[in-house]
């Protein structure tokens, strides 16, 4: 999930009651809910490095305790800074309990990332396979609004109560609990709809061929619309699925014939980007083009993201390998070429 949802989930966990057990609970939960995404530092090694290591060791069961410990180190540093300025917490920090809170938040982060289509590798380095539930989009507006309301509405009512002189009482616990319960209910509903969508794709033929495998991926704004991807013997099909009505939008479906392997595509697949991309992509498509100045450009795309691209445009997270005329790798990048340094 995107960072805001992670931060808000951590805040709701604290406000739901965990902050009554120890000082610095909410701070720990909020930070630990997002700390695994510090792997963004791998972007300094380039876009291929980021694709290779994003949601890597910081998103694993083995790495989770270390990420939690690192988070607790940050919290301890903040606590010492507070003390140096004469500020104390209402409750004394219970550091062993805070470590458990941090570990729980890190594991929840991994689970939330597992629910979307990008996936995680929780068993790395023993098993490098990607796992994804494919039930929530990376940015889920419904969940985001629920979390925001849970945290903002109680504060608003608190201001109103203070103005009219009402007796103060702990605010926000009920809203936070409601948001977390809503999250669980949303997961149940989305899983139910997801299974219906996949069953629909498997129950029909596609261009006269049976499905060898099918997947359904959430879309951005419409929770009742899914992007279906079907692979048959000779083609791969991308089609919008509506489980509520039992409808497949075949008139807008995109059908891709499986391309023939060539020396150019084989050379691109053996490159670092090719190996990383094919390991990650569930429905990869590899296309080659000759360059006017000589050589080739090979584009890797993942069809699970095809719906959020315009017709004719490559899906997000497309990868590119530039080869010379002798099929040596000249350049590799994801998304777009690196900007040229001024001379």
Image (cartoon, grey):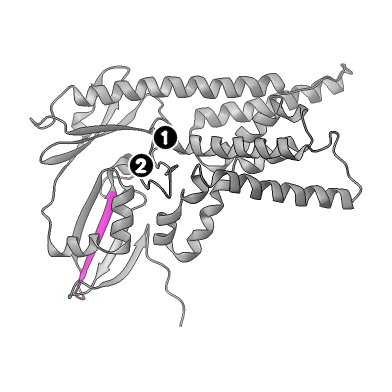
Q: What residue is shown with label 1?
A: 220
State the residue at coordinates (12%, 56%).
261
Asked if residue 157 lies left or right of residue 274, the reply is right
Q: Magenta part mainly helix, strand or loop?
A: strand
The secondary element bearing badge 1 is classed as: loop
Q: Could you tell me residue 47's position as x and y percent?
A: 42, 60
| 184, above or below 237, in the image | above
How many numbered marks have been drawn onto this rendered protein structure? 2
- Specify the segment rendered in magenta: 293-301
> Tag 2, which secondary structure?
helix
Give whichever of discs 2 and 1 has the lower sequence position.
Answer: 1
Q: Residues within 10 Å of mark 1 (few under 14, many from 20)?
A: some
Badge 2 is on which residue?
308
Question: Image point 53% across, 29% down: which residue?
Answer: 143
Residues at circles 2 and 1 in contact by the CB criterion of under 8 Å: yes
Q: Any magenta on residue 83?
A: no
């Amino acid at each position: 999930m995107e960072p805001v949802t992670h931060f808000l989930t951590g805040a709701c966990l604290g406000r739901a009651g965990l902050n009554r057990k120890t000082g610095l609970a909410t701070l720990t939960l909020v930070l630990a809910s997002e700390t695994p995404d510090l792997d963004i530092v791998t972007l300094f090694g380039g876009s291929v490095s980021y694709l290779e290591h994003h949601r890597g060791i910081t998103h694993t069961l083995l790495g989770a305790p270390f990420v939690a410990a690192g988070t607790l180190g940050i919290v301890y540093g903040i606590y010492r800074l507070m003390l140096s300025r004469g500020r104390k917490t209402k409750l004394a920090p219970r550091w062993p309990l805070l470590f458990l809170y941090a570990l729980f938040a890190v594991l929840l982060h991994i689970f939330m990332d597992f629910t979307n289509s990008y996936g995680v590798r929780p068993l790395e380095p023993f098993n490098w396979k990607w796992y994804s539930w494919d039930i929530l989009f990376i940015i889920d507006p419904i969940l985001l609004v629920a979390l925001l309301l849970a945290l903002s509405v109680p504060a608003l009512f608190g201001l109103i109560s203070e103005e009219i002189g009402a007796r103060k009482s702990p605010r926000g616990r009920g809203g936070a609990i409601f948001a977390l319960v809503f999250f669980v209910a949303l997961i149940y509903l989305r899983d139910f709809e997801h299974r219906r969508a996949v069953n629909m794709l498997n129950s029909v033929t596609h261009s006269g061929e049976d499905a060898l495998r099918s997947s359904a991926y959430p879309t951005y704004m419409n929770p009742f619309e899914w992007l279906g991807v079907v692979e048959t013997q000779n083609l791969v099909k991308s089609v919008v699925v509506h489980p509520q009505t039992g409808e497949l939008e075949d008139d807008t479906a995109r059908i891709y014939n499986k391309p023939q392997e060539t020396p150019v595509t084989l050379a691109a697949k053996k490159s670092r980007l090719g190996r990383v991309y094919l390991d990650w992509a569930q429905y990869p498509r590899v296309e080659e083009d000759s360059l006017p100045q000589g050589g080739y450009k090979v584009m890797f795309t993942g069809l699970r993201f095809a719906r959020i691209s315009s017709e004719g445009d490559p899906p997000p997270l497309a990868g590119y390998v530039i080869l010379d005329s002798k099929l040596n790798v000249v350049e590799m990048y994801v998304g777009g070429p690196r900007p040229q340094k001024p001379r």
